[in-house]
Image (spheres, helix red, strand yellow):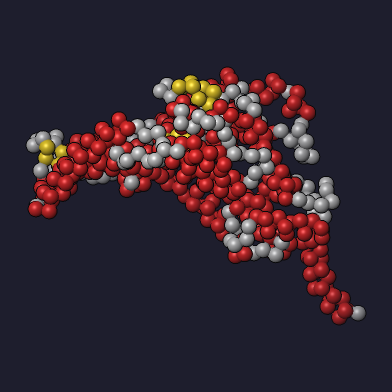
Amino acid sequence: GLEAGVSAGPVEHFALEAEVRREQWEAMADLDLFFTRVYGYFRERGLRCILLSRVVSLLMLAFTLVASFAVAELVNWQGLLHDCRDEQSCMQVDFFRPLREPPSLFMCGYLVVFATHLAWQAAHIAAEVRFLLEIRTFYSRQLGLDDAALQLVGWDEVVRRLVEHQRRSKFCIVKETLTAHDVAMRVMRKENWLVALVNNEVLPLRIWLPGLGSRQLLTKTLEWNIYAILLNSMYDGQFRIRKDFLTDIPGLRRRMVVAGVANLALLPFIALFMAVFFFLKHAEEFHRHPGSIGARSYTPFALWAFREYNELPHVFDERVNASYEPANRYVASFPARELGILARLVTFVFGSFAALAILLSVLNQDVLIYTRIPAHEGGRNLLWYLAVCSTFLAVSRSFAQEPEAGAPEYWLRRVATCTHAMRSDWHGRAHDPAVHAEFARFFEYKVVVFLLEVASCVTTPLTLCCAL
């Protein structure tokens, strides 16, 4: 009897573990959260990719913070800009200066704000690991997909296996059967609200900006605040809109004002971080391809206006990416011919200077370094002028290209086919410069999109405190 009891112990233990694992994935309490995690795990293609992406984002945040501090407090700007005049004097100038006094009050606040954000992100990643491991277990044991297989399958296959798992275990107790629409609706519940708010023009997003005129401005900063104030507090534990959310208008108003004041207090720190991060991210690209400064992208408002209800992000990204070529071709159908003619002159002049500098360097490489224009201590060497000429040459070439063939109506229809967005008053008027100008507000230069994001540090507090 004793032997039987001892031998039955491990068997019962494993049987109990199997029962616990089976019950873990039955009768999910929060289906929205569960399906969102399942979809997120699929979209980022497995545990290792997710963790690596999180760590890389954390390191980029930390590097931006350290680079900001180093550039502001440690770089010897006085010596580099004023004392470094020739090879001998530059050798005596240290790139970094000793930190003999505490950083400025502004820099201390900047470091505290983003170091706190960095610590919060690290804690969030650490807490997320447990849920990621659970989702990996669900994929491998219940759906039969490990991380290697997840690199190759599509979302349709994942949904098919979810539907089969529902037939076996009834983990979704609110419905007998499960469909792809049910899953998408759960994943996109909050996003559907934002799609509705944008498309029905419920949010007062129109604002006047100097030099840009009146436009509808929905930036990432404002979007994050809408989620924090509105969308994340709408539902109760039963996925129903809370009654006090509908009736407590003063409470909602107070949350918006508090968020607006908080955004206003953090304005200088956020603007500085955005500028530094944008520079670090795009400076090398602009250096290699200066013409890319004229690249365009859709504004955040346009992307939300293009969204369909229950459309998952990876499907939406495919649609939008397919529209970039016809969108660029449509914009190119309205060339600034006067600008192109002037750009040819600029290309010729700066190209001639660059060719002359290159020829001199072939004959005598020391000429580039030691010849200064003007010929005194404040003059620049030819290498500096060659770099400037090369930059202007690359930019001017992007404007001096021959205009593409027209057919604006064809290209705008192609854009509408991909984006599912076509204003009724644009039909048959694609050749109209007014339609082109309106479309360009949705398809802006990337630099303008970045400047709008920086401007939102000011406009977001005003929108939250006064407009909403």
Is residue 146 left or right of 74 when viewed as pictured?
A: right
- Image quadrant of residue 232? top right
Q: Position of residue 293 (x, y in %)?
A: 36, 39
- Residue 264 percent location from the top left of the image: 51, 25
Kindly identify the residue that appears in the image at 59 percent across and 39 percent down: 420
Extreme residue in the right direction: 1
Q: Is residue 102 visible?
A: no
State the residue at coordinates (46%, 28%): 432
Q: Position of residue 431 (x, y in %)?
A: 46, 31
Residue situated in front as seen by the camera: 13 or 334 = 334
Question: Image height check: is 179 above or below 196?
Answer: below
**Name of the residue lying farthest toward the top:** 466
Percent position of residue 112, x then y: 48, 37
Left or right: where 394 falls relative to 133 = left
Quadrant location of the N terminus in the rendered image: bottom right
The answer to which image quadrant residue 146 occupies is bottom right
The answer to whether residue 18 is visible is yes
| Image height of 256 relative to 135, above or below | above
User: Which of the 4 quarters of the picture holds residue 80?
Assistant: top left
Asked if residue 70 is positioned above or below residue 172 in the image, the reply reads above
In this view, the residue in front, 11 or 319, is 319
